[in-house]
Amino acid sequence: MQNDVETAVFTIEVGGSSTQYCEVSGDELFPSSRPASTNCQWLLAAPGIVNGDHVRGAHHIGWGDVSASEQLNMSHAPLCSMNDAEAAALGEWYLRGSHNGRWLYIGLGTGVGSAVVVDGIVSEVDFSHATGFGPKICGGCGARGCLDAQIGGHALSNPLNLNDRERVLNTLTVAIQRLSNQPDAVVLAGGMSRKFPDLFKDLGRRIEAVVFPSAIELPMKSAAPWGLLCEWKKG
């Protein structure tokens, strides 16, 4: 595509293991090596607490309290920004046909990300940093027994052994069953779910909700770019 670099729009998704760039063309997304210019328009998905250009608490990527544009060498703030799990949750909901009901997104990667989508509205859920899951202290929220500290990729063997795989399934099952508002559907995504595609089937046998794998295909990192696109076009 030969878009002017000043008006071209890119999505940038920052993660623990990689950063993915996509160029936006209408309602389509095209993976790119990086934005054509540091002065282009851009949309941001990042872990942690994201507010405009400000990101804090993203300990897996070393962003304790930063300006995202400075970290990514962009000349200005993003047009739209979201927490990466919230963006991915909205993207999964959109890609699967905008279904009704309560959708719980769980991203299993370097850390554990989560969000809920109801009728196209995405919100936080007390899941990724829920406590009561062992003695480890989370590097992000600082709580003992945090879910992320127990089954985030940083806390597991690589490659995942059978004991850790069972720990992931058991912990997810208990965490979902503890939710005060039970989901109608669960989307299990992230790097760990791609490496172990049967995880979603095994989880589905243990809980009441329908469990789906991610709707995206490689080389896409997650559904976050579609979520960013949806959110940006709302406003």
Image (spheres, rainbow, N blue to C red):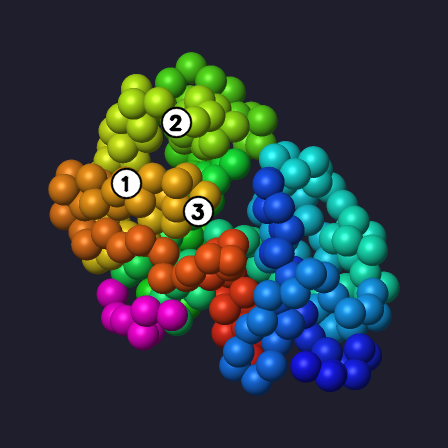
Q: Secondary structure at mark 2?
A: loop
Q: Identify the residue at image location x=66%, y=56%.
A: 51
Q: Whole-percent x and y of residue 170?
A: 25, 29
Q: Quadrant of residue 102?
A: bottom left
Q: Is residue 109 visible?
A: yes
> Residue 160 — which label?
2
Mark 1 nearby-residue class (10 Å; few <14, some 14–19, many ≥20) = many
The three-letter amino acid code for the residue at tag 3 is Gly
The three-letter amino acid code for the residue at tag 1 is Leu
Give the residue pinned by disc 3: 190
178 and 19: which is toward the camera: 19
Q: Identify the residue at image location x=73%, y=58%.
A: 53
- Whether pointer 3 and pointer 1 mark residues with C-beta atoms closer than 8 Å, the reply is no
Mark 3 nearby-residue class (10 Å; few <14, some 14–19, many ≥20) = many
161 and 143: which is toward the camera: 161
Q: Quadrant of residue 8?
A: bottom right
Q: Whole-percent x and y of residue 153?
A: 47, 31
Q: Which residues are magenta?
A: 95-101
Q: Mark 3 or mark 1, which has the lower sequence index?
A: 3
